[in-house]
Amino acid sequence: MTSPSETGQGSRRTAPVGHAAMRSANLSLLLRHLHAHGGRSRATLAQETGLSKASVTSLVSDLVERGLVQEGSVERRGAVGRPGTEVRLAPQHVAGIGLELNVDYLAVCMRDLAGQVRFTDSVPMPYALDPAASDGRFYPLAPILDLAAEQLQRALTAAAAQGLWVAAATIAPPGPIDYDEARVRFASNLGWADVPLGEELGRRLGEGHPMLTLENDAKLSALAEAPRLARRGITDLVYLTGDMGVGAGIIAEGRLIRGWSGFSGEVGHIGLDPAGEWCRCGRRGCWETMVGFDTVLDALDEDDPARSGRLPMLERLALIRALLEAGHAPLQERFTRLAGDLVRGAGVLVDVLNPQAIVLGGYFGHFADLLVAPVQAALDERLLAPDGRVEVSASSLGLEAAAAGGAAVALDRVLDDPLLAPVLRG
Ligand SMILES: [Zn+2]
């Protein structure tokens, strides 16, 4: 049976439903407009969105009631008419959380609706890689899930203490995801396959936990970095995360590319050398066997403390930096070759995707001073045509890019449906 709304008939009978959906869509339109363009008066909002002034006034009071927007200073634009009071996103009531779970650390970030960071924390992965684990998992599943839930709980406790309602939390595991089921399909560097991450974390957090969704770390990093580049007219970019593994977040014409089943961006496993080293994914000569963080650690002395996964990642990177500056020859040689090895894979990405920008994240971004210029020069040299030039830069978000992207994606939930936010009391 077809409902009247589907056939477009009987609009009078379905009017209440249509009205609610329309109202929700208009609330979202206003909220997203303020999110994208910043505070402005009701009159300007009406002009720019095409909604009537009366509608804008009514919708804004709904948004105020839910703590999503607030009145600001007097708008000073234009000479015609009375200056209006500016309406802008309210920072004090609604937040989103992102959690990155990778081989080296678990980083959590909470941001409010106005984009301010309200809580961050990062703990190093306390378990060492066990290549001989009997269950095939290089890193133990249950204790790491406990740790991830603890990190989320810390952020939730901070939210409660600051009076913030959490719209959702986005978890970023290092590998492709089954979005519908909130499962990790596989994470080759953890040795995990088919893990119901959303369900496991939800159970640990207990009743009343916020909605948990999953997104790939590189994709979240790309989303976190995209607005900065979009302000300069860059809509096509590839974000490369450098960790034990290497992944890419691909944004084309301003949109994140997930691929047919979410596997896009698994660029660390592009085969570049059939006779190369074995990769943890089971293939040979994958790009990440040439540029993964392991390849830097391999240049260190056997007992170098930077090899220890027990130290925070930033400390390990600082130790490596100190060795480079002290003239550690194998490490210096490794970084010289690293730029060339990066170009081997990046060149393929440039030829396939024709991005305007490549953003180096993870440890690549941390050593941007050593990598950006040679990678840029080598990519310029192999250009097919001058207008195919790609700009190479470092991530502005450091090791927190994925967690920050996760928090932003979590807030999308309330930007899409503002009625999810609870009405403020009193
Ligand atoms: Zn591989």
Image (cartoon, rainbow, N blue to C red):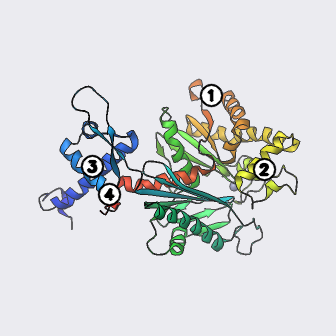
Amino acid type, label 3: Val
Q: Disc 3 or 4, which lies upstream in sequence?
A: 3
Q: Is residue 49 left or right of residue 354?
A: left
- Choose between 291 and 19: the one closer to the eye: 19
Q: Is residue 97 above or below residue 86?
A: below
Secondary structure of the residue carrying tag 3 is helix
- Location of residue 251 with respect to 106 vertically, above or below: above
User: Residue 271 in the image: x percent, y percent?
Assistant: 69, 49
Label 4: state its secondary structure: loop
Foreground label between 3 and 2: 3
Q: Which mark is residue 60?
A: 3
Q: Which residue is mark 2?
A: 295
Q: Which residue is mark 1?
A: 384
Residue pictured at 25% horizontal, 51% vertical? 61
Residue 66: assigned label = 4
Mark 3 or mark 2, earlier in chain: 3
Marks 4 and 1, Cα distance to the nearest angstrom?
Answer: 53 Å
